[in-house]
Image (cartoon, rainbow, N blue to C red):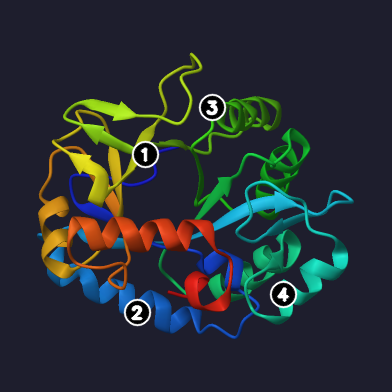
Amino acid sequence: MALINPSNEFLVVKHSHLNNLNAGFDLGKIVDDALKLEAHTNGRRVVVAIEGDIIQLAHGEPIFTHQSFFRHSLEQFGELRKAGIAVSLEEAFDAYQTFMEQYNGRLVLCLEPKPITTSATIHHAITELKRRGIRDAYFDSFFARCLTDVRKANLCQQTTYPLSKHAIGNVWIAPILVDTELEPPEDIITVPYPSSFGFLRVPVIYGAVGDANKLARVADTPHCYGAYVRFKEGHGRIAGLLRLLYVSSTNNPQSRKA
């Protein structure tokens, strides 16, 4: 399944918004604001995506919230949900489908499995995507094991959801990866713009793109499929990296709704 046509389309990824779908967000406004970024994508039509972190609670229920290492209890999930930074998988997919009933365009889901995300959670997500007929979705992860689980679930369900390997950065054509486990090539590499030095020669999505000028620059980059547009991350490389580190290591309404 092709995520976009990179010759004339550009993916704008809205970070953490899938985690926040129960927080009263106006998806219509989020999409409309993202579409206005076509002024900075060098003639490429914007396709909007909303991203979220897929994990599971201690008893196994799949949820979306930002957490890499510890399973939340049902009580902890309740507090995070009340704060507007967590949602169950079923609730998120329901909200997405309700919006799509009234929206004629495309809205892509980006699911990011974390180190604690189990194979069962990934299989459940793909099974549920297929059952609901949701085709516009892809999986992005730093971790080879998670992407291997996505491949296995795709094979089991006879689906073709694309995969993105998230890198820490890159030096010219070489991505810097969290793990070096041997694996088949991914469909896409995602790399933070502040830690990207030189151009990758594979399909790439740039993360933490901090202003409109940088957005225009990456949209004109060979092999670029899209960008996480996060204009609050900071304009310089140092500021952007510091802000990215803070956001990546915290889970509160201020950082998750940035």
Q: Which label was assigned to residue 144?
A: 3
Q: Residue at x 55, y 50 (%)?
A: 111
Q: Which of marks 4 and 1 is nearer the N terminus?
A: 4
Which amino acid, by three-letter code, is at mark 1?
Answer: Ile
The residue pinned by badge 4 equals 81
Per the image, label 3 sits on a secondary structure element best described as: helix
Q: As drawn, which residue projects farthest toward the right?
A: 59
Disc 4 versus disc 1: distance between alpha carbons? 29 Å
Name the foreground residue: 258 vs 132: 258
Residue 132, how many percent across, how many down?
69, 55
Comparing labels 4 and 2, the label whose residue is closer to the camera: 4
Labels 4 and 3: the sequence-earlier one: 4
Mark linked to residue 32: 2
Q: Quadrant of the C terminus?
A: bottom left
Of pointers 2 and 1, the one earlier in the residue sequence: 2
Whole-percent x, y for residue 104 in the image: 44, 71
Image position of 54 (left or right of 88): left
